[in-house]
Image (tube, rainbow, N blue to C red):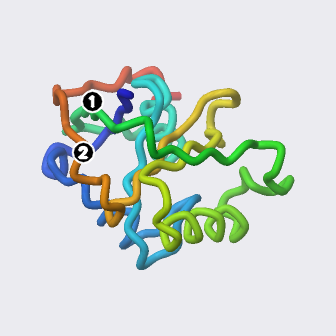
Amino acid sequence: MKVYRLSKAQFANDLSGKGAELAGGRWNSKGLPMLYTSSSRALCTAEIAVHTPLGIVPTDYVIIEIEIPDDSLEEIKVVILPKNWREFPHSQSTKKLGDIFLKNCKNLTLKVPSAVVSGDYNFLINPFHPGFAKVKILQKEVFEFDRRLFIK
C-alpha cells in the first residue's frame, strides 16, 4: 500500500518517528516514536495547513511516497472514539489508544480517521515493529503549497 508524508527537506529520509517522539501528537504521547503518514497528498496538505499560522506559507517541504506492507494493519473506527477525539489540544483518549498500539507491537500500521478531513485516513507506523524493515521510500519530490491555503 502507498501512503504519503510531507516533511521538511532536511528530514525527508527520516522515517524514525523522532519528530512525533519529541512533540507528541494526536495519536502518541511524548517519548514514543510514531511515523505519521496519510492516505493521499491532499490529506497531507490539509494536515500541515491546520498546524500552520495563517499568513505563513510553509517552504522547503518534500512529499514522500512510502510503501508499507498491508498485511499488518490495525484499524480504529470513528464509532468507537469519544466525542472529543478531534479536539485540540489533543485528547488523552486518542494518545492512549496510539500508545497501546505502539506498546503492544502486534501490527506495523494503525489506520485512524483524520480529524481534519472527515472520511479520510492517516496511517501511523510503529518504527519498533519487526516488519518496519519492509517500509520503503518509493519517491521524493519538492512540494510547493498553494499560497491560497495560507493567505487571508
The mark found on residue 135 in the picture is: none
The residue nearer to you, when weighing 109 against 90, is 109
Task: Give x and y (percent) for residue 50.
Answer: 54, 42
> Taking 20 as reference, is 54 left or right?
right
Task: Give x and y (percent) for residue 77.
Answer: 73, 43
Task: Give x and y (percent) for residue 38.
Answer: 45, 35
Gap between marks 2 and 1 measured at Cα: 14 Å
- The residue that disc 2 covers is 134
Which residue appears at 52% of the width and 70% of the height? Answer: 104
Which residue appears at 67% of the width and 61% of the height? Answer: 94
Residue 89 in sight here: no
14 vs 42: above or below: below
The residue nearer to you, when weighing 50 against 27, is 27
The residue nearer to you, when weighing 14 against 109, is 109
User: Quadrant of the image for the N terminus?
Assistant: top left
> Taking 61 as reference, is 128 left or right?
right
Q: Secondary structure at mark 1?
A: strand
Residue 81 in sight here: yes
6 vs 39: above or below: below
Q: Quadrant of residue 128?
A: bottom left
> Taking 83 as reference, is 134 left or right?
left
- Please report whichever mark, 2 or 1, sits nearer to the chain's N-terminal start: 1
Give the crowd class for mark 1: few <14, some 14-19, many >=20 residues within 10 Å: many
How many numbered marks appear? Answer: 2
Q: Quadrant of residue 2?
A: top left
For discs 2 and 1, the disc positioned in front in the rendered view? 2
- The residue that disc 1 covers is 65
Give the crowd class for mark 2: few <14, some 14-19, many >=20 residues within 10 Å: few
Task: Give x and y (percent) for residue 125.
Answer: 41, 52
Q: Secondary structure at mark 2?
A: helix
- Label 1 amino acid? Glu
- Label 2 amino acid? Lys
